Each structure stands twice: as C-alpha cells, then as structure tokens.
Image (cartoon, rainbow, N blue to C red):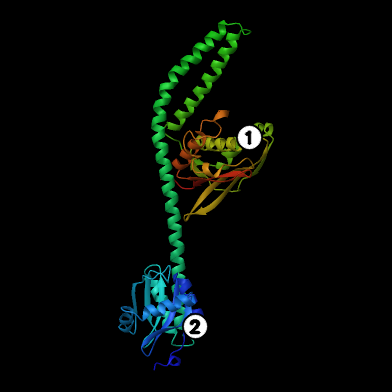
Amino acid sequence: MYNVSMVASPPAQRLKLAASLTGAVWAAYCFRDVERWKLAEKHHLLVEQAAALEELLNQEPFTNWLQTAPQAGARSRLLNSASLPGSARLTAFSAGWQTFVLVGTAQNLTHPQRRIWKLATVAEAFPEPSPGQVGLLQHTVMELRQTQQELQARISAQREAEARLIQAAKLAAVGEMAAGVAHELNNPLTTVVGFTELALEEIPPQSQTYIDLEMVLKEARRARSVVRRLLDFARQGETSRIKADVNEIIEDVLLLTKHLMHTNNVQPHIRLGENLPWALVDRNQIKQVVINLVNNALYAMPEGGSLSVETALLPRYNRQWFTLSIGDTGIGIPPENLERIFEPFFTTRGDRGGTGLGLSVTYGIVTDHGGMIEVESRLQAGSVFTVWLPLEDAA
C-alpha cells in the first residue's frame, strides 16, 4: 500500500497562494493509494466537488492519463464536468512518484503561471523552501504584476486613442457638410438683414410693422451668427502657433467675463500654477476654448454658484502636459448625455439659443493641438472639464 506519510503533504496556504497568483479556479493534491487516485489537501473545492473530481480521476481515460504522466513536468487536458464549474482545463504538475498537484483553470496556463505551479509542487517535497526558490518565486510574481500593469495601461491608452479617432472622424464628416450648408445660407441671410434694415429706416418706430420687422432682423442676425459659427467649425485654415503663456491667455478671458460672472452671481476661484512652461499654441484658438468652457459653466449655474479655474503641470503617457480644469457647481450633465456632448449640434439648450457647436469646436481645437479634453460630471453637483495640452509640438 502507498504510504501517504512518506510524502510531505502540501500546505493549504501554498495551494491558496499559487491559485491566487495564477487565477486558478481550484487546486488539489492527488496521490495513488493501491488501485485508486485520492485527494489530500484541497483549495476552493467543496466536499461534493472533491468527491466528483476523485470519481472522475478513477475513470477512463483520466486513470491512464495520470498513470502515464511524466514524473517531472506537467500535463494538461480539457475538463468537461458540470460538477466543477468555471474550470475548462485540468493541469497536473508532478510532485513526486505517482503524486500530482491538480489545477483547474478557465483556460491554458501561461508560461509564467506554469513556473509558479512548478515551484509550488517542487517545494511540497520540502517543509522549508530554499532561499533560491523563494527568490525565484518572488521575482516571477513581480514580473507578472509588472506585465499586468503595463498591459492595462496600454489597453487604456488604446481605448482613449480609438475614442478620439472616432470623434475626430465624426467632426470631419460634419465639417464638410456644414461648410456647404453655411455658404448656401450666408448670402440669403445677408440679403434679409440688409433689406430689413433699409425697410426699418422708412417705417415709423411706433407702427406694428416696425416691431415685426425688428423681430425679423433680430432672428436673421441670430441665424447669421449660427452660420458664422458653422463656418468657424468647418474652416480648416492655417493656424499660427507660437510659444505662449497659457496662464496669460486664461487671465485675459477671465477679465472679459468678469462682469458676466458678477451679473450671474457666480464666484470665481482661480488657481493658476506658478512658473509653468509655455506651450506651443494658437492664442486665438485657445482663447476660444476657454471662452466656450467658461460660458458653458455659467449656463450650467442659472441660480449662481462657484466657478473654479485651475492650471497645472501633470505627467501622462511618459510626458509632461499643461492642464487646464474649469469646474462649476451647476446642474451637471445626465449620464446618458456624457458621451454625446462633443457631437456637433447636440445641445440641451435648444430653447435658449444653443447651437450645439461650442463643445464641438472646443474638441476640434484641442485635438488639433495634439491634446485631449475630458469631462467629469454629477447631476446637481456640477461638472469639471479638463484640457490636456502637450508641451512639445504635436507633430
């Protein structure tokens, strides 16, 4: 009879540690007792699951599979058992003469994961692992964790790049359409405005016709303003980029909007970073970005509130970025609208003259500078828009 005491029993904590490092569903120590395979230490196996696994090991073809398994190495095969959910593969690691550590996984173990289990099974024959084995195991664990972190960072960066590419493609398509539509509308609107102004000069201001024509002139001018913004959105003109102090550009915009903040009962909180490096930007375009974001913040606080403007130098993707954050304490953006706010013509202020072009233009300017724009928002708690501008030439 096979004497179990002749082989050191694998500690349960060793099975648990190796399983957590490799993502194994379960693990167990298996040995040959006379004519049957039996289980000793187990990890994440219920009593009925262990009984089902033991019964499976003593059926064809698993009996021959274990019987002919190499005494030093590992062997893997498919495991189709309803009693062991979540484990599609069974891997056996040799731990001595007719003794194995069985590991159930959802898929094939990678090479580093196999190394961890081999180290665990080798160590089972010795109550105390050698310092070399401990060092190798720790090194393998560190490599796995570092690889996982790098992979997650690359996946995250790729997803962000894909999202920006899709948005840029949308803007390009709409921009071509907008240019044609705007040019077709601009000429008749100019005619309407001009002839309405002439007619108003000939009509007494007290007449109803004068009042009606004033309304026509007001709406025509508003329509012409929308057309002008369409042309600005679609125009792919030359930009003039120079090294500039973005903090100075922001201060200019805040000075222009100071009165608007006061009349809207909005308290500004300005925290501009000191001694920040200059960025290569088009001053007028960046000024347009700041104006659009500040105006959006003011619209989001109809009852007043707090406007925060912050700049800083932050690292991302192994480089330094100039960051501008503009936050408000307003009504916030519904979750279902967050992914659409940069789409052209998408607006929730259509009844108040909103055209849905401000954030689209902002997005286009920022991405054209090689930067990024992000938003965080909670209903009735406010929103924060963060612009990331590279400190080097985007090219």
Of 68 and 339, the residue lying toward us: 68
Which amino acid, by three-letter code, is at mark 1? Answer: Leu
Task: Provide the secondary structure element on which disc 1 rests.
Answer: helix
Residue 394 visible in rendering: no
Q: Is residue 231 above or below residue 2?
A: above
Q: Which mark is residue 11?
A: 2
Q: Which mark is residue 236?
A: none
Instruction: Tell me the residue at 49%/83% (across/down).
Output: 11
Instruction: Tell me the residue at 55%/51% (across/down).
Output: 313
Q: Earlier in the sequence, mark 1 or mark 2?
A: 2
Instruction: Tell me the residue at 53%/8% (across/down).
Output: 199
Of 98 and 135, the residue lying toward us: 98
Q: Position of residue 104 (x, y in %)?
A: 41, 73
Q: Position of residue 395 (x, y in %)?
A: 40, 45
- Kindly indicate whether the residue at mark 2 contacts the one at mark 1 (C-beta within 8 angstroms): no
Q: Is residue 147 above or below residue 268?
A: below
Task: Provide the secondary structure element on which disc 2 rests.
Answer: loop
Q: Position of residue 250 (x, y in %)?
A: 58, 39
Q: Is residue 2 above or below residue 117?
A: below
Crowding around mark 1 (Cα neighbors within 10 Å: few <14, some 14 to 19, many 20+) is few
Of 85 and 160, the residue lying toward us: 85
Which amino acid, by three-letter code, is at mark 2? Answer: Pro
User: Which mark is in front, 1 or 2?
Assistant: 2
Residue of label 1: 255
